[in-house]
Image: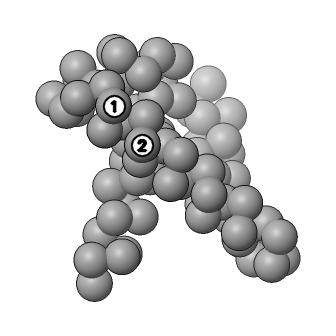
Amino acid sequence: MLGSRLRLVSLIQTQAVAECLNFGHAAKALRVSQSSVSARVKISMFYAEISNSNGCFSGSATITERRSTHR
């Protein structure tokens, strides 16, 4: 359970960085430290790399798809 919550928080923080295009602004919007956001984004990227290397669907693609459909 903790592992899935960690991944969800990581995805939320990664999406915030993608939307703000700045780690500091994303951290401020989420009311957390910039170092926390940086660490969580690294975790998200790690999971994305593992998923891609195993031929699995990566959650990072959904963020890109959402951003392109909302413009």
Task: Judge left or right: residue 62 versus residue 10.
Answer: right
Say which amino acid is labelled 2.
Ala
Disc 1 crowd, CA 10 A, few/some/many (<14, 14-19, 20+):
few
Quadrant (top left, top right, bottom left, bottom right) of the C terminus: top right
Query: Which residue does the image show at 52% across and 18% down from the upper left?
Result: 21
Marker disc for residue 39? 2
Q: How far apart are marks 2 and 1 (CA)?
A: 6 Å
Disc 2 crowd, CA 10 A, few/some/many (<14, 14-19, 20+):
few
Task: Judge left or right: residue 19 versus residue 32.
Answer: right
Q: Which quadrant would residue 30 be assigned to in this image? A: top left
Against 68, residue 60 (above or below) is below
Marker disc for residue 35? 1
Against 23, residue 9 (above or below) is below
| Residue 32 appears in view | yes
Against 5, residue 45 (above or below) is above
Name the residue furthest bottom: 1
Query: Which residue does the image show at 41% across and 47% down from the upper left?
Result: 40
Name the residue furthest left: 31
x and y percent of residue 55 in the render? 83, 76
Q: Are marks 2 and 1 in contact (CB under 8 Å)?
A: yes
